[in-house]
Image: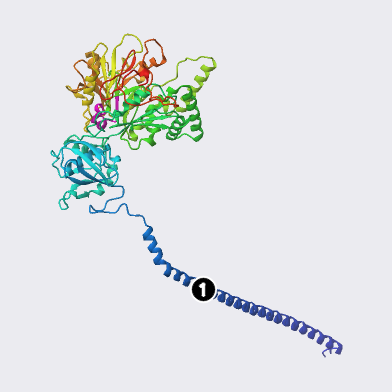
Amino acid sequence: MPARSHPLDECHAMRDIEASLGRGAVRRGSVSGSESSERRRSRNADTARSQAGKGKDRARTRSALQNNRHGYWLLLILFLCGPLGTLLFFVLLPPDTHSTDETGPYELGTKIVHLALAGSSRRARYVLDEYTVWGTFLAGVRDRLQCGPIRTVTDSSGEAILAVADMVDHDHIVIHADWSGGLGEAQASDGGGSTLVRDRRSGSDGLLRLGNSTRRRHRARSLPKLIEQVDALQAQGSRRGVSPEGSPELTPVEPCGARHPTFRLAMVVPWVTDMPPWITYFVASARRSSYLADFLVFHEMIEPPEHLPDNVRFIDLGVGGLSQLIGLRLGDELGMPVRNASLLIRSLRFMLDKWPRLVAEYKPAFGTIFEQYLGDYSHWGYCDLDMVAGNLPLFIERAELAEHDIVTYSFGDQEALYLRGQWTVHRNEPRVSSVWQRCDHIAGQLQKELLLKVAWVRRMESRGIANYPKRFQSAEGCYSHQAVSRGDLRIAMVHKQAVGLTASGEPEAAIYAVDGAVWRCAAETRVDPDELARHSSAGGCQLSLPGPHLPVGERRPLRMDAEGCGRWMPVEFRMCAPELLEDGDEAARATTTTFDVADGRFYGQRVAPAAGTTLPNGCAQLAFFHFQEWKKNWEGSGATTIGIEPLMAPARAGAAPRFSARPRNFTVTSEGIALLAAGRIHHGGRARTGG
């Protein structure tokens, strides 16, 4: 029989169930309450977002309305002020200085000049661009005006025109020439790759310019192409330049114009100390070379002479600037770290201050050191300041510049095969300008060599020794040897300079600088300076640069030896051709030596002087005179040193004396320098008087 539950037990059980159910109801009620709260919060958030969105929409609407109002105002302002602004723009616009005329449109950078043949009714226009050179301008003028050789070129006021740069846009140019004897050709080249053609349809004033794309390729043309262009111009005849009459500052008329259209030489001359007294003779004589050469004198805070010719530029590098430029450029080219380059500059500055002549040791690297100044030149070279330049355009030959990479002028020691420091010219190309890197003392071992020099100087000074042998490595040694051993450089060595005057002893010869030409006469020769002046003026330059020498016979190969010349050079760098002396000194001096890259040998070519360069009395004209040992006269070493003071400008009240580069005629002997009253340049008195 089943046990019956007690009523209390059932009561308790019911309570427990109710309590359990009550707790469940409470939990369910709690969840439902939480869910209701979440829903309320969600609805509230949605309501807030909705209200915020409506607020933003209303703000955007207000902003758009405001922007529209601003746009409406802007449109209104433009509508009212636009025509007025346009009108003001056209009123204030400067006149068009490059407007075209009936000759047609031209590119920016061109100039139009109006030509008139003096004494006739012939008129024409000529278009010049940045590539037009003087010689080709004259050729084009003769073609346009159908005239003969041009005597002078002036502007409408009568002022002489000497170069294309002297003319401005729409300039009126007067041509003084013969009416007949024109070129007879309808076409001429302007030197820039374009062609000037007569426009038969528009009459004598019309001009068509063709070949613009060719002109743009002008800079990429090779040198032989430009040389062919010059030959074509030369076939049309000699073009005469002009020189203002009555000007004592100018040398004789240059028959071939102001500048050569193809070749331009930059002769680099760095100078460290104060200006030497002989520099005035150098600068005064450099004027005659303006057709072919510029002389760039780099210095540190010196005052150049007065009356400088246009082809002599003094470039001030500031205190210590020369050593800094040399150090930076060589250090950069050799890949030196900055610290090493700084040490290099300090060492260079110390050495150049102690021994300025050391700068000559770096002559082979001048093409690299001064590269930033050489961009507009076909050739670069080095020379000295202790020289008197002659008629260089008469002596520099086209074949030398066009067919060789390096050309050097000797003073008659042709048996010595080396590049002279007095005059060596290089083709301005990296493959030629980088030969110096083959010489350790200025390349791979440059820093070590300089430190050895500094240590040597300090050691000698610490011992109180003032005169001591310098550690100098001549550029004529290693550099010459390496240029030849490279095997791919065409080299010419020609006798064209005069030296030989000594500071004392019996006079050997006399030098005459007359009207821009340099003559060497034997000491016992009776010389008429006026006769020299006549021959100097007759020896003008030619566009073809034929040179003063004529070949005689066949060239012959030369045997190279390490003995017989150049004893100041280490034996490993000596290159001698003693067989040239077998026929005597005169035969050796009359031999041009060239290095042939085809078989790697030197050849000798006997030459004879061209007409007018050697006179019946034995006086011979040369490219320049090198003072060399003679300049020791300036040290006042003897009582015979007379008349060797520098050329001075006329004294002015309250002004310090100034050197002068005004052209003078003078003679140089073992006794000194004396001014000459002869030729076109008349200046009496001696150099001692200041001229």
Closest to the observer: 570 or 160?
A: 160
How many badges with numbers are in the image? 1
Q: Amino acid at mark 1?
A: Ala
Q: Residues within 10 Å of mark 1 (few under 14, many from 20)?
A: few
Q: Residue at x 20, y 18 (%)?
A: 615
Residue 6 versus residue 492 in the image, above or below: below
Q: Residue furthest front?
A: 653
Closest to the observer: 46 or 293?
A: 293
Colouring rule applied to residues: rainbow
Image quadrant containing the N terminus: bottom right
Q: Judge left or right: residue 421 versus residue 132.
A: right
Closest to the observer: 97 or 601?
A: 97
Residue 605 lies, in percent from the top left, at 21, 22
Give the image quarter of residue 540: top left
Span highlighted in magenta in the image: 393-408
Residue 173 lies, in percent from the top left, at 24, 42
Residue 510 lies, in percent from the top left, at 29, 15
Residue 687 versus residue 444 in the image, above or below: above
Residue 457 versus residue 16 in the image, above or below: above
Q: Residue at x 16, y 40 (%)?
A: 147
Q: Judge left or right: residue 8 versus residue 251.
A: right
Residue 469 appears anywhere in the view: yes
Task: Decide whether residue 182 is among the magenta residues.
Answer: no
Residue 40 versus residue 193 in the image, above or below: below
Task: Decide whether residue 406 is among the magenta residues.
Answer: yes
Q: Residue furthest top?
A: 506
Q: Residue at x 19, y 46 (%)?
A: 123
Image quadrant containing the C terminus: top left
Q: Which residue is mark 1?
A: 64
Residue 332 lies, in percent from the top left, at 44, 35
Q: Judge left or right: residue 375 versus residue 457.
A: left
Q: Judge left or right: residue 533 versus residue 337.
A: left
